[in-house]
Amino acid sequence: MRILITGVSGQIGSYVLELLTKKYEVIGVDLKPCPFNEECRELVITGDLRSRKFVQRVVKNVDAVIHLAAQVSVEKSWIDPAFDAENNIIATVKLAGRVCREWGKKIYLRIVCSSLRKSDLCAS
């Protein structure tokens, strides 16, 4: 199975990429180069998910997509809410349509969390 993982320059995306390389053929995608695991850098394609041509190219020969890409900075979302909406909402809607309807891929996963505190995870 060949899996496309978006958002691999982020912490969660880089972990998922590294983990899945042990069992599957994976391709990572992000707007910026992966700053983490040196071994996984060769699996990463830099590009913009808002571009139809780019998405068409990267989903062409994959069986599944794990979508983890997002602009997660709360501060940046206040400074430029239009970019935040375009990057996080519009790009996700476009990707979902392209992956599910146009190419009939089997899996689509979206994980979102703009901020997480210990108190969000633990009962008081």
Image (cartoon, grey):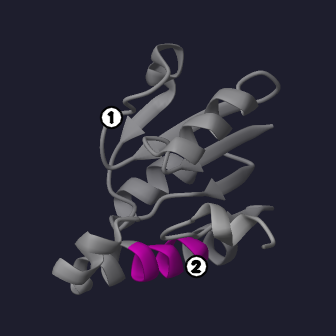
The Cα–Cα distance between marks 2 and 1, rounded to whole angstroms, is: 26 Å
Q: Which residues are magenta?
A: 88-96
Q: Residue furthest top?
A: 39
Q: Position of residue 56 (x, y in %)?
A: 47, 57
Q: Which picture quadrant has residue 54? A: bottom left
| Closer to us: 80 or 51 | 80
Q: Amino acid at mark 1?
A: Pro
Q: Which mark is residue 93?
A: none
| Label 2 crowd (10 A; few <14 / some 14-19 / many >=20) | few
Q: Quadrant of the C terminus?
A: bottom right
**What residue sits 50% from the left and 47% below the top?**
58
Q: Is residue 103 visible?
A: no
Q: Which residue is mark 1?
A: 33
Q: Position of residue 32 (x, y in %)?
A: 30, 42
| Label 1 crowd (10 A; few <14 / some 14-19 / many >=20) | some
Q: Position of residue 47 (x, y in %)?
A: 33, 48
8 shown above or below 41? below
